[in-house]
Image: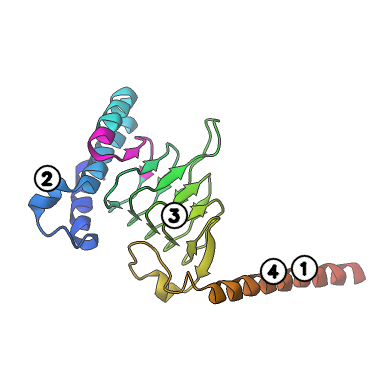
Amino acid sequence: MQWWRLVREDFRTVFERDPATRSKLVALTVHTGFWSVAWYRLEHALWDSGFHWIARWLAMFSRWLTGVEIHPAVKAGRRLFIDHGMGIVIGETAELGDDVSIYQGVTLGGTSWAQVKRHPTIGNNVIIGAGAKVIGPITLGDFVRVGSNAVVVKDVAAHTTVVGIPAKPVIKKEEDCEKFEAYARSADENDPTIQLWREVEMRICKLEKENAELKNRLSELEK
């Protein structure tokens, strides 16, 4: 799909996901999130065509204007939405699916200096809350929600909400994860009692899994 068609979809997405934007004039003149995505689309098209230097120069220029730094080599799907934008950094080998929403202060960063796949792969319909850091060549499945200021360093299964440092799952319900929550918050994420019970449940699940593995090994040895 040609880059300007993607930009048209991105433009329509602004009105679906930002209730503060009520007119095309506002979106075209003051919505820095939209412009950061529009610039990225052009830069990526130039990058794919082999014009790497001009793509990088435009990326630097758009960062000055919008406060968002997206490497031109990033592969992003359709209807990418960035709100507020300031402080967002998306590294070179990051890959984003369709309908991803990203809020201010987010980093999709790498953990290596080697020229390898070192940035995250983000699935479809993912929301990454303000200040979150998703680090390394990990994968976030479809409909994942990353809470504000969370630090994600491990793969996250589809339809999961993660919060905290390091990020841990708080829900895994399809009907909940499909709801649009701007900052990917769980209603009870700060309740210490609920957090304690979740930790107990996770420990029990881990023990049950280890017990099942031991039983399988014992059965094999008996045979």
Image coordinates of residue 71 in percent, x first then y, are 37, 35
Q: Quadrant of residue 50?
A: top left
Task: From the viewer's side, name the closer residue of 184 and 15.
Answer: 184
Image coordinates of residue 39 in percent, x first then y, are 24, 38
Residue at 62%, 70% in the rendered image: 199
Mark 3 closeness class: few <14, some 14–19, many ≥20 residues within 10 Å: many
Mark 2 closeness class: few <14, some 14–19, many ≥20 residues within 10 Å: few
Task: Name the mark nearer the viewer: 1 or 2.
Answer: 2
- The disc, 1 or 3, on the residue closer to the chain's N-terminal end is 3
Residue at 47%, 56% in the rendered image: 150
Q: Which residue corresponds to mark 3?
A: 149
Q: Quadrant of the C terminus?
A: bottom right
Q: Residue 213 got which mark?
A: 1
Amino acid type indicated by mark 3 = Asn
Amino acid type indicated by mark 4 = Lys
Q: Is residue 66 magenta?
A: yes
Q: Quadrant of the N terminus?
A: top left
Task: Name the mark nearer the viewer: 4 or 3.
Answer: 3
Q: Is residue 210 visible?
A: yes
